[in-house]
């Protein structure tokens, strides 16, 4: 839904709405937001949300054995409008947004996870544009490795 073969996508709810209703806010693969009304009198608006990360994280920190991050493997099967997530960041990339009812959420993807690989290609040292291109030009089913921060033990 959020990452698609177009620069932006229309949500599945939008496809079910009539032509004079307002589309809900949706995100582009680069993390920017896009909203458009279908009536001819409205204009499109773009904004770039701030990063969801609380602090910068390096590729080295993610790969530190015994560190605070754990690797997870996700299989995300895209639907007619995409996979339902936004990649953002630069060496390493992270998940900026996940469509709550989209394919990525169903696969277990969460905001703030770091992207390690996409379909077997290591991406820790790629920027979000390269990672997005890899996703958009690949198959409908994505095999992704992500790193997720573990909760501190009390």
Image (tube, rainbow, N blue to C red):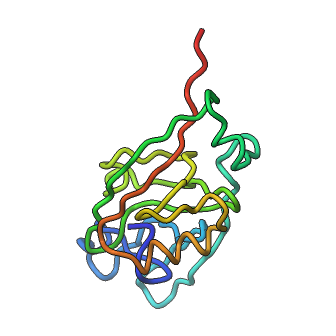
The answer to which quarter of the image holds residue 63 is: top right
How far across and how far down the image is residue 7, in percent?
50, 82
- Asked whether, in this view, residue 104 is left or right of residue 47, the answer is left
Q: In terms of depth relative to the viewer, which is nearer, 80 or 71?
A: 71
Residue visible at 49% across and 78% down in the picture: 36
Q: In terms of depth relative to the viewer, which is nearer, 48 or 37?
A: 48
Residue at the far bottom in the pictured view: 40
Residue visible at 66% across and 36% down in the picture: 64
- Asked whether, in this view, residue 74 is left or right of residue 121, the answer is left
How far across and how far down the image is residue 29, in percent?
53, 71
How far across and how far down the image is residue 153, in percent?
58, 13
Above or below: residue 117 compared with residue 130: above
Q: In terms of depth relative to the viewer, which is nearer, 29 or 133?
A: 133
Residue visible at 33% across and 58% down in the picture: 76
Above or below: residue 84 compared with residue 61: below
Residue at the far front in the pictured view: 65
Residue visible at 35% across and 63% down in the picture: 142
Above or below: residue 107 compared with residue 66: below
The number of callouts visible is: 0
- If the image is split into quadrants, where does the C terminus sit? top right
Residue at the far top in the pictured view: 154
- Asked whether, in this view, residue 13 is left or right of residue 62, the answer is left
The answer to which quarter of the image holds residue 123 is: bottom right
- If the image is split into quadrants, where does the N terminus sit? bottom left
How far across and how far down the image is residue 41, in percent?
51, 88
Above or below: residue 12 compared with residue 153: below
């Amino acid at each position: 839904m959020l990452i698609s073969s177009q620069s932006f996508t229309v949500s599945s709810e939008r496809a079910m709405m009539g032509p004079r209703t307002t589309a809900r806010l949706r995100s582009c693969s680069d993390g920017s937001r896009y909203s458009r009304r279908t009536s001819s009198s409205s204009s499109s608006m773009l904004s770039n949300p701030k990063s969801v990360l609380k602090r910068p994280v390096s590729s080295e920190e993610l790969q530190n054995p015994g560190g605070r991050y754990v690797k997870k493997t996700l299989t995300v099967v895209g639907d007619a409008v995409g996979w339902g997530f936004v990649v953002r960041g630069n060496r390493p990339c992270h998940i900026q947004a996940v469509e709550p009812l989209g394919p990525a959420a169903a696969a277990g993807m969460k905001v703030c996870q770091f992207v390690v690989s996409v379909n077997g290609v290591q991406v820790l040292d790629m920027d979000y544009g390269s990672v997005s291109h890899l996703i958009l030009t690949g198959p409908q089913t994505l095999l992704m490795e992500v790193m997720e921060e573990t909760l501190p033990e009390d």
